[in-house]
Image (cartoon, rainbow, N blue to C red):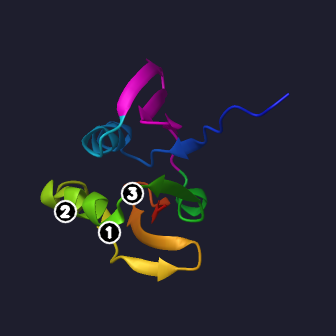
Amino acid sequence: MKFLSLEPFIPSGSNFDGSKQFFLELGFHINWEVDGYIGFQRDECRFILQRFDNDAFAQNFMLSVKVDNVEEFRKGVLDKQLPKKYGIRIGDISQQPYGREVNIIDIAGVCWHFVEQ
C-alpha cells in the first residue's frame, strides 16, 4: 500500500470569491466545486479551497510548493500585478537550506513557500 497524494484544505479568509479568482490567476484550474469548497490543481499540485475565515489559523498555516523556476514564478506574479490586484504580499527570492524560495502571503494570510527544485 502506498500513499498517493496530499491535498490540504486551505482557508479562503473572508473573501472566498476573491481567493478563488486569485488562485485562478496564479494558474490553477478548478477540478470540481461544491458549496464552500473548490478543488484546485496546477500540474501535479492540488489543494482544496475552503470557505473558512479564521485569522489566527490562516496566519499560522504554511505550505511548501515545489516549482522548477522560482524567478519565472515570481516574475509571473508581478507581471500580472497580483499583489496590487488582490492585496497579497510577495517576498524576494532567498536561499534556504532546502532550496531557493519566494514567499507569498495570500488573501487569507496563509504563507505559501514556492521552492525551486
Verify CB contact (< 8 Å) between mark 1 and mark 2: yes
Q: On the rendered structure, is 16 left or right of 112?
A: left
Q: Which mark is residue 78?
A: 2
Name the residue rendered at 35%, 60% in the picture: 69
Quarter of the image for residue 70 reads bottom left
Residue under label 1, please give it.
90
Q: Nearer the viewer, residue 46 or 60?
A: 46
| Amino acid type shown at disc 2 | Leu
| 13 over 62 or under it: above or below | above
Verify CB contact (< 8 Å) between mark 3 and mark 1: no
Q: Nearer the viewer, residue 44 or 117?
A: 117
Residue under label 3, please give it.
106
Q: CA distance from mark 1 to mark 2?
A: 9 Å
Chain part drawn in magenta: 29-53
| Amino acid type shown at disc 1 | Ile
Q: Earlier in the sequence, mark 3 or mark 1?
A: 1
Q: On the rendered structure, is 99 left or right of 80?
A: right
Q: CA distance from mark 3 to mark 1?
A: 9 Å
